[in-house]
Amino acid sequence: MRNSVARDFLTAVLAALAAATHAPAQENVGFAFRDVSKQSLGLWENGKPVFVYNHGPIAKPPMRSGVPRACYVHPLYGLDGEALTDDFAKDHSYHRGVYWAWPHIKIGEKEYELWALSGDLRQVFQRWNGKEARIPSQSFCKSAWVTDGRSHLVSKVT
């Protein structure tokens, strides 16, 4: 009896291994960056969108107020593929996805307000450090706060 149970178990294991060896391989693509437009780069995980990084100036849609903006994430997607962020909202046209800004910035004797995109200070994309989606992450682009043609703060997006 023991031998037949052991033989049946061994036969089942060998059959499962043989089936797994001949089964088509599931391709795990993981994370990948793809251009969405000339101004935007998207990140996908296994074919599903994660976010779009808008590195170039994004102009307002028709019939909405707001100035062009750059260097921010929108849309950021939830686990079910729904957009979690908004851009050029009707009630707050300066809101833009996920971005890095402050409402009060002083450079020299001049004050700026990057939060609501008023004044001369803007976030400007400078260059890609790489478009490889790896874990652990590395910085993939460099941008700066620019006014009067001069960079005042350089940041790396990771």
Image (cartoon, rainbow, N blue to C red):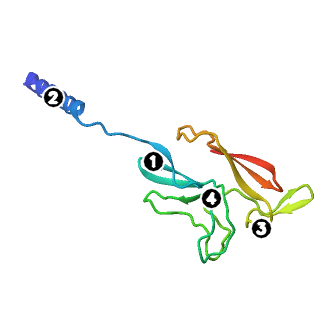
- Residue 148, horizontal then vertical, whole percent: 83, 56
- Name the residue carrying label 1: 45
Tag 1 near tag 4, CB within 8 Å: no
For the N terminus, give its image quadrant: top left
Rendered residue at 54%/58% (across/down) = 76
Q: Amino acid at mark 1?
A: Glu
Q: Amino acid at mark 2?
A: Phe
Say few, some or many: other residues with alpha carbon within 10 Å of mark 4 (under 14 / 14 to 19 / 20 or more).
some
Give the residue number, with chain letter if any, for mark 2: 9
Q: Which mark is residue 18?
A: none
Query: Sequence order check: which comes first, mark 3 or mark 2?
Result: 2
How many labels, in total?
4
- Looking at the picture, tell me which residue is in the foreground, 128 or 25: 128
Which of discs 3 and 2 lies nearer the camera? The answer is 3
Please state if 3 lies on the left or on the right of 120 as rendered: left
Q: Earlier in the sequence, mark 4 or mark 2?
A: 2
Question: Which numbered disc, 3 or 1, marks the residue that appears first in the sequence?
Answer: 1
Secondary element type, mark 2:
helix
Q: Quadrant of the C terminus?
A: top right
Residue type (three-letter) at the residue carrying disc 4 = Val
Name the residue beneath numbered marker 3: 118
Q: Amino acid at mark 3?
A: Ser
Residue identified by numbered label 4: 98
Crowd rating for badge 2 (residues with CA inside 10 Å; few <14, some 14–19, many 20+)? few
